[in-house]
Amino acid sequence: MNEWIYVALFMIVGAIIPIGAIVAGFIFGPKKPNPIKQSTYECGIEPVGDVWVQFKAQYYIFALVFLVFDVEAVFLFPWAVKLGQLGLYAVVEGIVFISILIVGLVYTWRKGMLEWS
Amino acid sequence: MTPEKIIFLIVAGATLASGLMVVTTRNLIHAALWLVATLFGVAAVFAILNAGFIAVVQIVVYVGAIAILFIFAVMLTRKDMRDSGPQHNKNWWAGALLAVMTFGGLVFLVQSWASLSKAAADIPSGFDAVSQLGNQLTSPNAYVLPFEVASVLLLAAMVGAVYVAFNRK
Amino acid sequence: MNFWTDPLKVAAEWLEGILTGWGMDAIFAHVLVVFLGVLLLITILMVLDIFLVWIERKVVSRFQDRIGPNRVGPYGLIQPFADIIKLIIKEDTTPDGADKVVYNLAPILSMMSVLIVWAVVPIAPVILGTDLNVGVLFLIAAGAIGTLSIIMAGWSSNNKFALIGGFRQVAMMVAFEIPMLTMLLIPTIFAGSMNMNAIIQAQGSIWYFFLSPLGTLIFLIAVIAELGRAPFDLAEGESELVAGYNTEYSGMKFGMFYAGELLHAMTFGGIWGILFFGGYRFFGLEQVSPFLAVLIFLAKALIGYWVIMWVKYTMMRIRIDQMLAFNWMFLTPLSFVLLMVTALANALLAGTSIWVYGIGMFASNIILGWVALEIVRSYSRKEREKLEGPRKVAEAHH
Amino acid sequence: MIPLSWYLFFSAALFSIGLFGALSRRNAVAILLGIELMLNSVNVNLVAFWRYGDVSMMAGQVFAIIVFAVAAAEVSVGLALVISVYRRRNTVIAEDLDMLKW
């Protein structure tokens, strides 16, 4: 049988338990909404302006570099699994692979894109 | 109807429904979240196909990184999130027609090819897809060149994206 | 085979026998029994989670020279139950303008992302969810769902603090996921498998901590950042971001985020133990009985959890720019270099005796760590001299 | 056992949905979302043919992983272009970006 059935069961049960807890909270808790209670929390001050503030461009860069290294790791996991049985040439291939991507990291770094401000 | 078929039909139906939501929802963050649901369904299809590694990679790359990238990009390109104007262009009917025709053509092609209705052989016991992949990706007789080129491609993407998006003049 | 050596299988077969005896389909009975097993495991985890609240409060109070909860029950043991009851009877508020569906989905996904990790955690040689051959990568996949839940919570709350806090937290989590992924490759290289159980089995002769002490440390740092605990708990910088992405949550929905965080910490304490400290192995004691193995694993998980708490309560929060600079300019390059050095040393030392191999690995790690620290030290000295001018050495002689 | 053609129908449907999204959306980010769907449907095909052919031939899975890398590159450069255009022209509506028309 497909082993992913077990993972699916974990997902189902893992969703049921928090849903149950939240529903219990919904049933047993009081429900007395009023406009002031429902208003956005801003430390007691009236909310001013739009919620959708403008974000720094750096967020995009972080996610971008993460995406690239994420995909890189995807390639490296099968490589790592077989590394013990393969010879030195496989190690060299992996080192070349990682080094090429480190060049990208260094480029982004030199452009000052990895700094917060 | 075996249980496997029922599971596949449920997963495929949910995936296609969320795929339709991706292309029709007005709110772009919602569209990105529907995309996550669609990709999750595709990962489930990979799991049904016994391709566990690809299924996990799908979650790691798409849900973990690409969806986050989309959401960040939407936040960066929308000063106000309120939708303005229609979400589809005025030639949307032509796009829909073309999509339906593509689908019809593909279905016609697949249907006319009888050998595609065969069932799969069982996975041999002791078969480890990940270690096979490791062999193939590093073997000079197989895919070592694509392996290295992929890293160059990713480097080009990273450098290009950083240069294009934030080249201050 | 008896109950003492393989309790799960014996119980499952007994139950399946009863169910098929009632005329149930064999496959369906199997799935049902597995479902019950999963339900049992997750219920135990949730009960453990409740006690983690107590443990956390007791430990933090000891660190801060207090006594902690001590009124309700012996040693305050009943206190967490009182907390739970309080959370349940709290009102569940939803702010105006919140995106209701996404807002309610976020705490569920947050808790689920922690619980599904246990699908691949081997608690004992015969007690494990599933024997996936991609176990290590599965951890990252589960973490991806957690990251998504944070962004959903921050976005849907219609609150500036939640939005900014959520985005900062996600930026930090994705940044520290790179060293974490890289460090996950190191046990994979040693064990030649991504299967968690195989990684534990391969640590029979030597724990991976001794082969890769630097990797163990980097993994711990990345895990702490991934958990969003101090010193990386910028989302909880109360004076600037209130409570980060869960500012608008109350009642049981907040409880899910909170319980998820505690269980996440304990889970990753356990995974730290599995990847680098032999998991349920302890000098052959795990062979005696699975029950003993469970106790060993639990002890290692709690020690890992204690280390995470120790760091949390002794270090102060660092600023987000420092945190990200630390990751991008130190931890990420270092982890890549460590991966390359490990792969190279692994190939060069292959075939040597376990002593040569172990000492070579250990030494290469220590040397690499020392070189990295020296580079950072000289860099920071240069930076300081740029700011303050060269240090006046001559005056010290007068 | 599920016949192979079911997977192909599924992937054809997903491809068509993505095609519709890519052709009809006005927002450039949404067009990229549609392209993601199309790339994914390709992956479904590749993995299905791997499973229904000789399992020890890993070409299907290797291609699928390469498609992941291509998708990552496409999305990162595509979104960077969108952000760049947004910074200069203050719009992400594809129809308004007609600088190349005479």
Image (spheres, coloured by chain):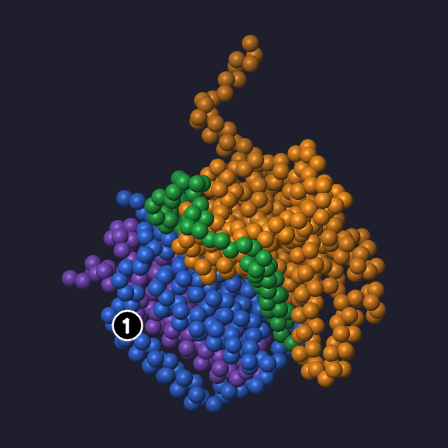
Chain colours: A green, B blue, C orange, D purple
Specify the amino acid type for callout 1: Trp
| Above or below, comparing residue C81 to residue C134 in the picture | above
Q: Position of residue C361 (x, y in %)?
A: 67, 47
Q: Position of residue C383 (x, y in %)?
A: 46, 30
| Above or below, comparing residue B37 to residue D5 in the picture | above
Residue hosting label 1: B92
The quadrant of the image that shows the C terminus of chain B is top left
Residue at figure coordinates x 79%, y 61% from the top left? C290
Residue at figure coordinates x 69%, y 69% from the top left? C36
Whether residue C211 is visible, yes or no, is: no
Q: Where, by quadrant of the figure, is residue B120 drawn?
A: bottom right
Q: Where, by quadrant of the figure, is residue D38 drawn?
A: bottom left
Q: Please state if A73 lies on the left or on the right of C160 as rendered.
A: right
Residue at figure coordinates x 62%, y 77% from the top left? B123
Question: Which type of secondary structure does the marked residue at label 1 adopt?
Answer: helix
Q: Position of residue C59 (x, y in %)?
A: 68, 40
Whether residue B55 is visible, yes or no, is: yes
